[in-house]
Amino acid sequence: VGEQIAFGLAAGATLIFGALVITLKRPFQATVSLIGCLAAVAVLFVLLQAPFVAAIQLIVYAGAIVVLFLFVIAYLGERPTPELDNPLARVEAFGWLAVAALALQGALVLGMSNLPGLWDEPRPVGDIGSPEAIGRSFIDDYIVPFEATSLALVVAAVGAVLLAKRAVRAEGGR
Amino acid sequence: MTSTLNGVPLGMYLAVSGALFLMGLAGVMIRRNPLLLLLAVELMLNSANIALVGFSRYWNVTDGHIFALVVMVVAAAEVVIGLGLVVAVYRQRLALDIDRMTSLRG
């Protein structure tokens, strides 16, 4: 029952902070809400027997990625964005249509699924979330994806440097 | 949901995951500031991670955790490029409005 209470709190916090992220208009406030949402998701990971993923979630996501966001927001400064006319106002309804259609589809799939035990007591699990189990899985089965992630990070870093260089050159610098 | 349960069934996690994904999608649809758009994309990536880790527990395997970690790496790369683009646009003194960025130059 304690697990259910913890789940209710974490799930509620996830959804409330998620709603704040998309409703708050100032980037700084939205980013701080994202920290709350990410921390609540980390609690959900702990409840799902995934302590290592939860730790990485807090360190990499709530730590590095959010700090990057806050740094860029601080660098750009909080500018009041002028309320420009929306050139896509005519088709805005289709965005909400997509959201509603996906919600309907998700509810139908979740309600009609005959996956055994979907709404039952979760079965006991073995050691799937420890650093050792994840390390073994990475080395034994997923060595190629593991190396591919490093390639993705290098490409992203080089791309960011090139973007910055081009932006400086466009201003007349070197 | 009967009161005889002690744990939380997989379906509840999937419901939270789906709701969070819908929030992210709605955020992408209604926001025009690229910074807020990236935040909404982060919500969608996180909802996918909840589903992956939830199914990993359901099947009693580690694969979902591996996927979630790879998704985090992809999210980091995406944020680096996205914020780089935001800063590049800002330095050319253009409005931070994605509906107005309609031309490319190589």
Image (cartoon, coloured by chain):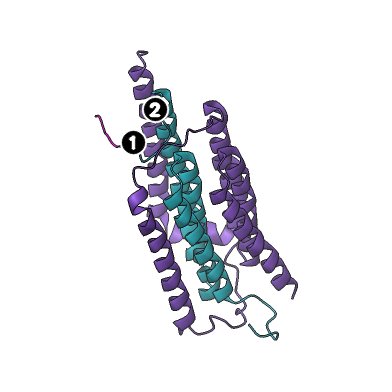
For the residues bearing labels 2 and 1, Cβ distance under 8 angstroms = yes
Q: Which residues are magenta?
A: B100-106
Nearer-the-camera pick, B72 or B45: B45
In what element is the residue under mark 1?
loop
* Number of on-image labels: 2
Q: Residues within 10 Å of mark 2 (few under 14, many from 20)?
A: few
Examine the structure image and report whether residue A138 is included in the region drawn in magenta. Answer: no
Examine the structure image and report whether residue B101 is included in the region drawn in magenta. Answer: yes
Q: Earlier in the sequence, mark 2 or mark 1?
A: 2
Nearer-the-camera pick, A100 or B78: A100
- The residue singled out by tag 2 in the image is B94
- The residue lying at 59 percent from left, 48 percent from top is A34
In what element is the residue under mark 2?
loop
Chain seen in purple: A
Residue B101 marker: 1
Above or below: residue A42 compared with residue A74: below
Instruction: Residue B41 in the image: state x and y as whole percent.
Output: 46, 50
Residue type highlighted by circle 1: Met
Q: Residues within 10 Å of mark 1 (few under 14, many from 20)?
A: few
